[in-house]
Amino acid sequence: MIKDVEWRTIIATYLGQPDPNLAALVGRFFGKKGDKLDEYGANLASACLPGAGFRIIHNKQQDLIVSMMKLAGIHSVKEAINFLQGKVGDPFMKRYAEHLTSQEGRRNAPHAIIPDIHAINYPAGKQTVNDSGATHCAEAFFEIKSFQPNNTRYNHNNTKINPADRRAKEVVQQYSRKFQKLDQNYAQEVVGDGRNGIVGPFEAAQSQFFGGQVIPVVVGAFGEVNKDFEKMLRTLAKLASSGEEGMSIFPLRNLDKKGGAFAIMHHQFRRAVGVTIVRDMANHKLSRLHYVRATAADAKNTAEANHSDNRGWNRGQQGRSGWYSQHTPGCYANYEQFRNGNYFGTL
């Protein structure tokens, strides 16, 4: 359930109005540089401060999507280090693997490509060899991104391309450069310096995944999503509604959305994404208020004092149980009624 303090911040942000939760603190200082808190709190939310605020938002979206995939019968792995194993031949893959194993923190190893989600049996369309209606599956990898409500992401000509799709385009370009960098580092005898136009083994490995590239999963500060994310939500809802969970959905008990199991399931998935992100964005901003101080010197000392304490943040302390299991008291039908009656009723 969304708390009152969260709701005030959510509504103020959506309407572009000053945040009433910050009224008493506007003009005070935060961060090592002593920035002044504005009336909207946008600069506080976007600032680089100690703690795992941005990572917490990311991880909750990641857990949410994995839970949805599980409902749809899709096996997925979070942050699979070896997702390229078997896609790139030796000696190139061996060189890359040795590089990863030599690093203390593999996820943050230089040049490492570790997608947020690696799906093993993602639906890739109907089989064409017969009329059985069976679905062809393929591996797919996803990168999850979210962004704050600030000028960097929203102050553009959004009539041509919305902020979520603009960010998704950047993700695809970034991954393309990452694969090219792997070829330059670990398959140099094939691509040289990368300026000869030759496609190396790492870049070519993308063709073995669904879509031939990373699938960007982007959700904005107001719950908007990019086109690929919307397609994925429809795919997951279709699969989930045709399974055991879909059989427990009754239109007469789900009055907030007309239609059958697919329409109701898709509606719930889409709402879950939107509510999760706006609530987490509000909590992210509010959780940083303890950095706001009366003087710039106090703000600097507070930021420095909290930096080392948060360096060892343990994600497990935040709770890693899935979105679905957290809110399922008995069966999927009860879960739907819980969400409809208590969670989404105010949106």
Image (cartoon, rainbow, N blue to C red):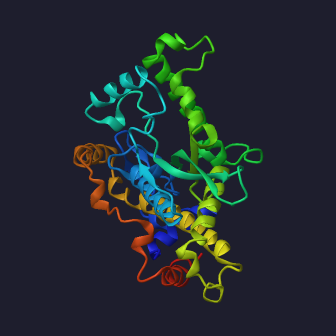
Q: Position of residue 202 (x, y in %)?
A: 51, 26
Residue sitting nearer the eye, 133 or 250: 133
Q: Residue at x 45, y 34 (%)?
A: 86
| Residue at 47% in and 23% down | 182
**Relative to residue 71, is residue 109 depicted above or below?**
above
Query: Which residue is the extreme one toward the front?
Result: 130
Quarter of the image holding residue 103? Answer: top left
Relative height, residue 131 to residue 216 (above, below): below
Foreground residue among 10 and 83: 83
Residue 204: image x %, image y %? 57, 27
Horizontal relation, residue 291 to residue 179: left or right: left
Classify residue 38 as left or right of residue 53: right
Residue 345, visible in the rendered structure: no
At 39% across and 38% down in the image, what residue appears? 82
Q: Toward which corner of the image does residue 153 lie, by quadrant? A: top right
Counting from the top left corner in percent of width and height, residue 329 is at 41, 82
Answer whether residue 200 is visible to the viewer in this image. Answer: yes
Q: Where 112 falls versus 210 (above or below)?
A: above
Judge from the rendering whether residue 310 lies leftward or rightward of residue 208; answer left or right: left
